[in-house]
Amino acid sequence: MKKLIIGITGADGVCLGVRLLEMLRDMEDVTTHLVMTRQAETNLRLEGFPSPDAVRDMADHCHSIDNMAASIASGSFVTDGMIIAPCSMKTLGGITSGYSCDLLLRAADVCLKEGRKVVLVPRESPLSRLHLRNLLTANELGCMIVPPMLTFYNTPQSLQDLIDHVLTKALLPFGISASGFRPWRGTEEECTLPLPERKGMPHGNV
């Protein structure tokens, strides 16, 4: 049984965290521990997604952002690591400086000090030099950076296809493969596979 901490911050794109919980909810061998910032709860409403309570119901365990005595605040509570999706630049800065002022930052700090995997899905554009410096520092500290970049080799047919591909890449370090993931298999095999019709997608050279 894998134990994953899921952090959702107030960056744009809270749909990433919601969809991640949806993907993990049906996996019997994965237990999720959710912690959300207050701005994440605000963004759920602003972006037209389910209420905070509805999102909490998707997780196996939910922790208050203020509960520094929660199980995930201690290294003695063993987990496989943490995914923060989306990860705000404020949270990124807190991780790189060791400023564990709330449970989400403390949980990330615990995973790093215990040598556990931490995957960040940063959401900001454009990125300043400070953002880039913090991303490099986070990677040097052991975090994997998985920005939600567009991917086309898997012939996505919808926005959800693009989101699912990013989130599946965020899950791969934990040995979790979501259904529907289409990895690159090389040009020889790809040339033998029929490509689905690309609705609304550009054709030919761009």
Image (tube, grey):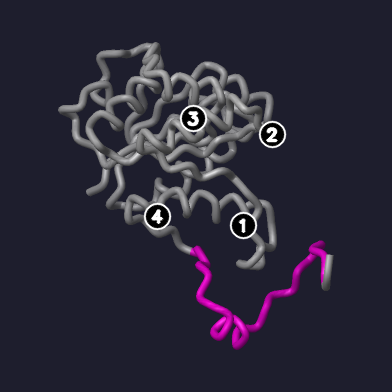
Q: On the image, numbered disc 1 is attached to which residue?
A: 161
Q: On the image, numbered disc 4 is attached to which residue?
A: 172
What type is the residue that disc 2 sits on? Ser
User: CA gap, disc 2 to disc 4?
Assistant: 25 Å
- How dense is the environment of label 4, judged by Cα within 10 Å: few (below 14), some, or many (20 and up)? few
Disc with the residue nearer the chain's start (2 vs 3): 3
What type is the residue that disc 3 sits on? Ile
75 horizontally vs 153: left or right: left
Q: Could you tell me which residue is drawn at 70 percent across and 33 percent down?
A: 126
61 horizontally vs 148: left or right: left
What type is the residue that disc 1 sits on? Asp
Q: Magenta stretch?
A: 180-203
What type is the residue that disc 4 sits on? Leu
Q: On the image, numbered disc 2 is attached to which residue?
A: 125
Q: Could you tell me which residue is drawn at 51 percent across and 37 percent down?
A: 17
Q: Nearer the viewer, mark 4 or mark 3?
A: 4
User: CA gap, disc 2 to disc 3?
Assistant: 18 Å
Of the pair 73 and 187, the residue shown nearer to us: 187
Q: On the image, numbered disc 3 is attached to which residue?
A: 8
Disc with the residue nearer the chain's start (4 vs 3): 3
Element at label 3: strand
Q: Nearer the viewer, mark 2 or mark 4?
A: 2
